[in-house]
Every structure is written in structure tokens, then in C-alpha cells.
Amino acid sequence: MNRTYELMFIVRPDMAEEDLDKLISTLETAVSTSGGAVKSVERMGKRRLAYTVRRFHDGMYVLLTVEGSGGLIHELERRLRVTEPVIKFLSVRIDEEKKRLDKIKAIRDARKKAPAAPAAAPEGGEPAPATA
Amino acid sequence: MAEETKSPSATAEASTPAPSSPSEGHSQRPPSRGPRPGGPGGSREGGRKYFRRKKVCKFCVEKIESINYKDVRLLAQFVAESGKIVPRRLTGVCTPHQRRLSCAIKQARNIALLPFAGRAN
């Protein structure tokens, strides 16, 4: 129930802004009704596609970070597949990766503090500059 | 005729030190390649030299932990002009990073950030 997913989808470039807002709010309500949470919505703007998709050369990219269960993502993907203006989507699970990154960061911070602590003790009141 | 008799003997001499490294293409870590003849099995794809100076893994050196499909500029450095993923023996990337990199490149290809084939614009 606490899986975090990143859902990126491409909308056709000739779509109006308010239609895009409507689409995003529909997805957000779908998320909240299934008991999930939307962490962030990022509109990456119009970009040139690396290859033509459904005869389009550009597309509006939207990145949605969602917290919820696997069934929720299944539902979102189903909706995106049916929505006509959405030409491509990709969902990636990111909580495991985040866990790994946090672990690395924690090890790094612990390593920084550990050599700083015994250096600070014999120094007395000297502030340890190693924490820069 | 004399040239024909000379060349097989030359290759026979050169290949005797080589049998210590049996499956050349499959070895993960070739510590010392030794003097290899460039003729047999020397495929020059992309016109790159075979034995460059020791390359280091860019991710290990710069301590880049997360290889995301979204940073196209980073991924595009490891993609050839034709759109193919460059093998790690040319880029010097270490194995775990190469695996993550190739996964990220494939994800980027799926979401049209990188092409499957052709120039990345």
C-alpha cells in the first residue's frame, strides 16, 4: 500500500491547456478514491519526440508521482490507454530505488560524521571543519 | 606460394601465447590482454582501437548513484550515433552500472526520449 510509482505520459501537442488540466484532475480523483496519494505533478512541457508516435513529432510530457498499491497503477494505466490524447505512457516503481539511495546517503553521512567525531574530541572546543 | 606458407606459421606463433585467454569475447575482466594479433577475430566495428588506456567507470568516479531514464544528456553519452547502446568495453563502465544504464536507456527509448535507431536529436 506504500509503493511509490512514477507515471510519465505524453499527450498530443495540439491539446488545450484546460483539457490537460481536466485530464490530470481526473487522474488525481481516481488516485484519491482508490486510497492513494498524489505526491507531485510536473509538466515538462512540449518536447520533440525521438521518433514519430502516431504521426506526431512533438508531445507534451507530464510526470506524475503517485503513492499507492499496484492495483491503483493498473487502473491509472487502463485510463491512460483509453484516453485518446495520451499517446504514450510509462510507469516505473521507485520506492525500492529510493530506499537504496537513502541507504547510500545514510552510509555517506555516517562516514562523514565518524572521522569528524574522534577528531573533534581531542581538539576540545575546536569546531571541526571537516563537515564542509 | 611462399607468402602463403609464411602467413600460417606467423599466426601459429602469435596464437600460442593467446590460448591462456580462451573465450576472449566473453570474459568480464580482461586483466592483461597481452599481445594479441589484430587479424583473427579483430572486428573493427565503429573504427575504434582495441586496446586503449585503462578506462574508469564514470559513475564510480563521479559517484553518480542514480541513473534515471529522465536525464537524457547523461544517457546520450553512452549511446552511439546509430542509437545502439555502447558496450562497456568501450566506455569503461563497470558491470552493475552498465546494467542499470542499459535499463534506463531502454526505459527512455520506450517513452520517446531516446530513439531506437537513428540520431538522437
Image: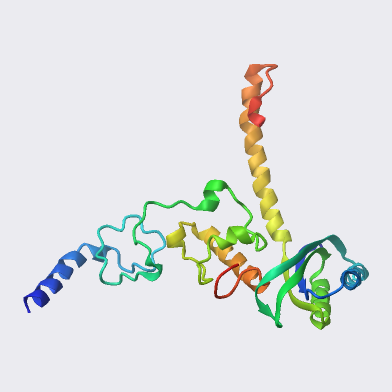
- Which residue is at a point 55% across and 64% down the rendered structure image? B99
In the rendered view of the protein, which quadrant contains the C terminus of chain B?
A: bottom right
Q: Which of B28 and A52 is in front in this view?
A: A52
Q: Position of residue B24 (x, y in %)?
A: 34, 67
Question: Horizontal placement of B19 versus B63: left or right?
Answer: left
Front residue of this view, candidates A65 and B2: B2
Image: A1 above or below A79? above
Residue B59, percent from left and from top: 55, 52
- For residue A13, say whether it is visible: yes
Find residue A25 and report its horizontal and vertical position in percent. 91, 69
* Residue A1 appears in view: no
Within the image, what quadrant is residue B16 found in? bottom left
Which of the colour schemes (rainbow, by chain, secondary structure, one colour) is used?
A: rainbow
In this rendering, is residue B70 above or below A86?
Answer: above
Quadrant placement of the N terminus of chain B: bottom left
At a point 33% along the width and 69% down the height, the residue shown is B23
Work out whether residue A82 or residue A56 is closer to the camera in this orientation and state it: A56
Q: Which residue lies furthest to the top in this view?
A: A124
Q: In which quarter of the image is residue A14?
A: bottom right
In the shown orientation, is residue B13 left or right of residue A106? left
Q: Quadrant of residue B117?
A: bottom right
Position of residue B19 in the picture relative to residue B66 (left or right): left
Residue under the image location 56 percent in, 47 percent down = B62
